[in-house]
Amino acid sequence: QVQLVESGGGFVQAGGSLRLSCAASGSIFNINAMGWYRQPPGKQRELVATITRSSTTNYADSVKGRFTISRDNAKNTVYLQMNSLKPEDTAVYYCYVDYIVSGRYWGQGTQVTVSS
């Protein structure tokens, strides 16, 4: 059974930092891309960042230069380091993992709230 466990969300003032983690079950050899989406209040879910099996990264324009995605293959974990946070970064953040055979699985979501 595939499980993704997220952690690291919380409340922070504008300009602050948070680090999200997402630990995935299963063998790293079966994992392709990993990444993060977010869903702001009253809005649709949007892509934040992705990292491929070869560690190529991609970011939404709104977070470039502020967020950094990384992965630790030994721990089957993907991270999202969020710096210089803004109130508009407030959202529920969801990690995902693309398994080569099984397809995409999602984390349970973690709330990030940035106050002005």
Image (tube, rainbow, N blue to C red):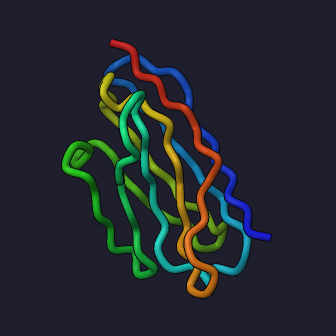
Q: Which of the 4 quarters of the picture holds residue 27?
A: bottom right
Where residue 16 sits in the image (x, y, percent)?
38, 25
The one of 81 and 111 positioned closer to us in this rendering: 111
Considering every residue shown, the one lying at the far right of the view is: 1
For the image, the number of numbered tags is 0
Quarter of the picture holding the C terminus: top left
Where residue 86 sits in the image (x, y, percent)?
30, 26
Q: Residue at x 51, y 54 (%)?
A: 79
Where residue 30 sits in the image (x, y, percent)?
62, 84
Q: Is residue 111 above or below residue 101?
A: above
Q: Residue at x 69, y 52 (%)?
A: 5
Q: Residue at x 59, y 43 (%)?
A: 109
Q: Is residue 64 above or below residue 70?
A: above
Considering every residue shown, the one lying at the far top of the view is: 116
Where residue 102 sits in the image (x, y, percent)?
63, 81
The one of 46 and 32 positioned closer to us in this rendering: 46
Q: Is residue 57 above or below residue 93?
A: below
- Residue 97 vs residue 36: left or right? right
Q: Which of the 4 quarters of the picture holds residue 38?
A: top left
The one of 116 and 68 positioned closer to us in this rendering: 116
Q: Residue at x 51, y 21 (%)?
A: 11
Quarter of the picture holding the N terminus: bottom right
